Amino acid sequence: MGYHLTVPKANDVFKQWSEENVIYAPKRFVGGGAFSDTDIIRYGEVEKIEEIEFNEKSDFSFKDILIPLSETLFFFTEDEVKEANQPKKGAIVLLRSCDLHAVKRLDEIYLHNGPEDYYYKRLRDRVKFVLIGCENAFDSCFCVDMGTNESKNYDASLELKNDLVYIDNKNNDWEELLSANSSSIEEVVPAHVTETITRVSIPENITLDIFNSKMWDEYDSRCINCGRCNFSCPTCTCFTMQDIFYTDNGKVGERRRVQASCMVDGFTDVAGGGSYRKKNGQRMRFKVMHKVYDFKKRNGYHMCTGCGRCDDVCPEYISYSKILNKLEDAMQEVSK
């Protein structure tokens, strides 16, 4: 069902939603950028429509809501273990189509890749998703080529046009609230991107021979293994565990799950002093091939959703989309 709401009425809806949920959306943090005089757009709690950044892409994705940067799993003493409490409220997340497709990738990793991840599932079950209509692509986006430019599996969609809020609702629990606050009830079709400036072409004939291509060598010197691409990506899911001890004897403390990056030093360290993929080019190869080869071999679709954030945040201006476009030549190189 489609609804047209004025901004004040939409804010009334947000107020009702906030009683049982925390609402997250792309939000501008003034002065919070990489430099003192720059802003950053990332996900944060919002209470009103006016707080949402509709016109620019968020520098970081929504994923911290489902897989927090640092999450305490349980507390322990010498005699017992106590599970950490989950948040008291649920969550409503406003996100674009590429990010909504990323949720499917996260679910694949945490819910369908062996036993369900208990801590992920208890958060995931309490999250509702509101699609932000996305009419025009940003410069680095390539969602059309990745097939993620359009979504249907949302609780509601929301767009702001000419001081009116257009909502397409699929959640029965919200019907009464939206109907009571709408100025009219009409069909609403979420806008979606149909073409992008950045284009990628991923060959279907990729094999493991591509690991031997010389294309990866340039990233030994270009990449500084900072991990920004991983932490901004909505589908990177790697984590490590940390035990925090409160006492010197190590018998009281907590265990945390912390986001990790396959691009940083120490990620592949193993017991006995072993370490794998020491070169930055090898790490780049692993990341890229996981996104467009390994994951697809297992699940039938690419892990990458084409959001373009990795291109946006790289301090060395390494373009992931251009790497994808080099794969065709790389396969020809190793096939000779």
Image (tube, grey):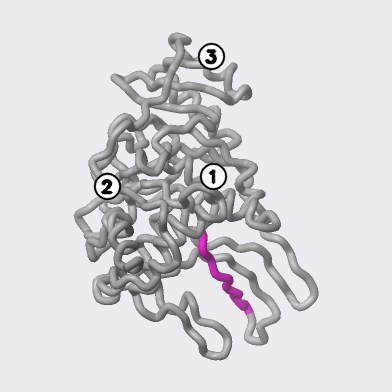
Determine the residue located farthest toward the left in the rendered image: 37
Q: Residues within 10 Å of mark 1 (few under 14, many from 20)?
A: few
From mark 3 to mark 2, how far is it between C-alphas? 38 Å
- Circle 2: residue type: Ser
Residues in magenta, as a range? 237-246
**Residue 302 in view:** yes
Question: Label 3: which residue?
Answer: 179
Dot in front, 3 or 1: 1
Q: Residue at x 33, y 70 (%)?
A: 213
Q: How many marks?
A: 3
Name the quadrant of the C terminus: bottom left
From mark 3 to mark 1, how far is it between C-alphas? 30 Å
Quarter assignment of residue 298: bottom right
Instruction: Give the mark nearer the N terminus: 3 vs 1.
Output: 1
Instruction: Give the mark nearer the N terminus: 3 vs 2.
Output: 2
Question: Label 1: which residue?
Answer: 104
Q: Residue at x 66, y 49 (%)?
A: 122
Secondary-structure class at tag 1: helix
Question: Label 2: which residue?
Answer: 140
